[in-house]
Amino acid sequence: MAEGSLITPEIRAMLGQELYFAGKELIDRTAIRRYGQAMSDLNPLYIDEEFAKKSRYGGLIAPPTFIFDVSHDIFAEVGEDGRDLSRVTIHGLNAVRGGNEYQFFEPARPGDIINRRRKVTDIYEKKGKKAGMILFVVYETSYTNQKNELLGVCRETMMFVK
């Protein structure tokens, strides 16, 4: 560890670590409709079953960002120590979201169960202009359905500062 470095051996050991979160509940039409309404997106592919049946999808689909926002079961993702296992946490440092990058492959549909696999893919640090050293942790979360079809990927960068 370099002088003043935030990357401890424990933090370096996070690189490549992977966690799997199995989905617990079926996505239903109501959740899709309410999500579309909350996003002010009333696309008939999300709310009109007859319209959606005639589309290339052959039925209702969820908006693309649905899987990233609604597929978390926070109560199932808390460890015995009360730590939120769905997030990268580093004790003694404050976390700030540094950005997200999304890829979409297949739409989620009513009846799907969404599973997530999160892997830490990069750890590095930079000297900030005002904040001192900033630790960056990049992780990639893949979202699949019960058929193991890849629906989407989110690459998130978290910044940690003292």
Image (cartoon, helix red, strand yellow):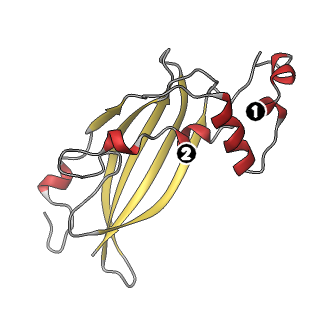
Which residue is drawn at the image coordinates 28% and 57% (left, top)?
89
Tag shown at residue 46: 1
Give coordinates of residue 70: x percent, y percent.
54, 41
Q: Earlier in the sequence, mark 2 or mark 1?
A: 1
Q: Are discs 2 and 1 less than 8 Å apart at CB?
A: no
Neighbour tally class for label 1: few under 14, some 14-19, many 20 plus, Cα within 10 Å? many
Q: Secondary structure at mark 1?
A: helix
Total marks placed: 2
Q: Is residue 40 left or right of residue 26?
A: right
Residue ID at (51%, 22%): 145
Left or right of 72: which side holds 50? Answer: right
Identity of the amino acid at label 1? Tyr
Which residue in the protein does label 2 denote?
69
The kind of secondary structure element at disc 2 is helix
| Disc 2: CA contacts within 10 A as few (<14), some (14-19) or many (>=20) | few
Percent coordinates x, y for residue 78 in the rendering? 29, 45
Q: Note whether 27 is above or below 148 in the view shown.
A: below
Amino acid type of the residue that numbered disc 2 sits on in the rendered structure: Asp
Residue 20 placement (x, y as % from top left)? 33, 32
Q: Which residue reaches farthest front?
A: 30
Q: On the picture, is 80 further left or further right than 35?
A: left
Q: Camera-side residue: 129 or 53?
A: 53
- Quarter of the image for residue 91 reads bottom left
Locate the C terminus and report the quarter of the image it occupies.
Answer: bottom left
Residue furthest bottom as drawn:
130
Residue occupying the point 57% across, 28% down: 27
Q: Nearer the viewer, residue 10 or 144?
A: 144
Look at 48% across and 18% down and name the residue there: 146
- Residue 8 location, x and y as percent? 15, 60
